[in-house]
Image (cartoon, rainbow, N blue to C red):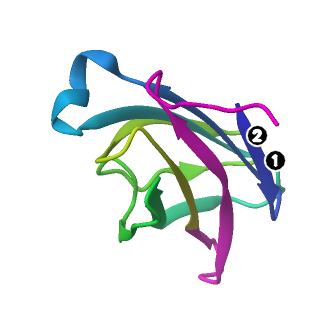
Amino acid sequence: MYESITHGIRIKVEPQYVEEQSSPDDSYFFWAYTIEIANQSDAVVQLKTRHWRITDAHGKTEEVRGPGVVGKTPVLDPGGSFTYTSGCPLGTASGIMVGSYQMQLQDGSLIDVAVPAFSLDSPFVIRSVN
């Protein structure tokens, strides 16, 4: 589990390799990740946009930007939370994701909330211990 807190917004990420949606022989590896966004601040916030930087084991990076998450722009009252699951394919057996959400406060101002970097590791990753 990976976790960060920015402006009182806690982000928890739990990635999971999805074997049944992967095809290692075809260099296709798929992960699901579940994210919990918890508002620990005193302000009402609304998630407006997302930004992801996804890097595979060869260093190839893809940036993804768009409105909301999984088609939603949830409003979180103080103490409220929102959980969703999405997915990410890669052409390598491992990679890393990092990102941010842009949230809007009731007064219209915007804040950026960091999503911690999280590792995408499959059982096909060869690890060496130094």
- Residue 72 position (above or below residue 121): below
- In the picture, the disc for residue 40 is 1
Question: Disc 2 designates what residue?
Answer: 79
- Residue 31 position (above or below residue 118): above
Left or right of 57: which side holds 64? left
How many neighbours does mark 1 have within 10 angstroms: few (below 14), some (14-19), or many (20 or more)?
Answer: some
How many neighbours does mark 2 have within 10 angstroms: few (below 14), some (14-19), or many (20 or more)?
Answer: few
Check whether the beta carbons of the residues at disc 1 and disc 2 lie within 8 A of each other: yes
Quarter of the image with the C terminus is: top right
Where does the image place residue 3, in percent across and percent down from the top left?
75, 43
- Residue 53 position (above or below residue 34): below
Where does the image place residue 96, in percent across and percent down from the top left?
54, 51
Identify the residue shown where x is 76% and y is 40%: 79
Q: Is residue 22 magenta?
A: no
Identify the residue shown where x is 63% and y is 31%: 127
Residue 87 visible (yes or no):
yes
Left or right of 28: which side holds 117? right
Write the start and end of the magenta stretch as one range.
102-130
Q: Helix, strand or loop at disc 2?
A: loop
Amino acid on which the number 2 mark rests in the picture? Gly
Identify the residue shown where x is 59% and y is 68%: 103
- Residue 59 position (above or below residue 96): below
Where does the image place residue 54, in percent across and percent down from the top left?
45, 60
Residue 23 visible (yes or no):
no
Where does the image place residue 51, in percent across and percent down from the top left?
47, 68
Quarter of the image with the N terminus is: top right
Left or right of 29: which side holds 118? right
Q: CA distance from mark 1 to mark 2?
A: 5 Å
The one nearer the camera, 62 or 6, is 62
Picture quadrant where residue 26 is located? top left
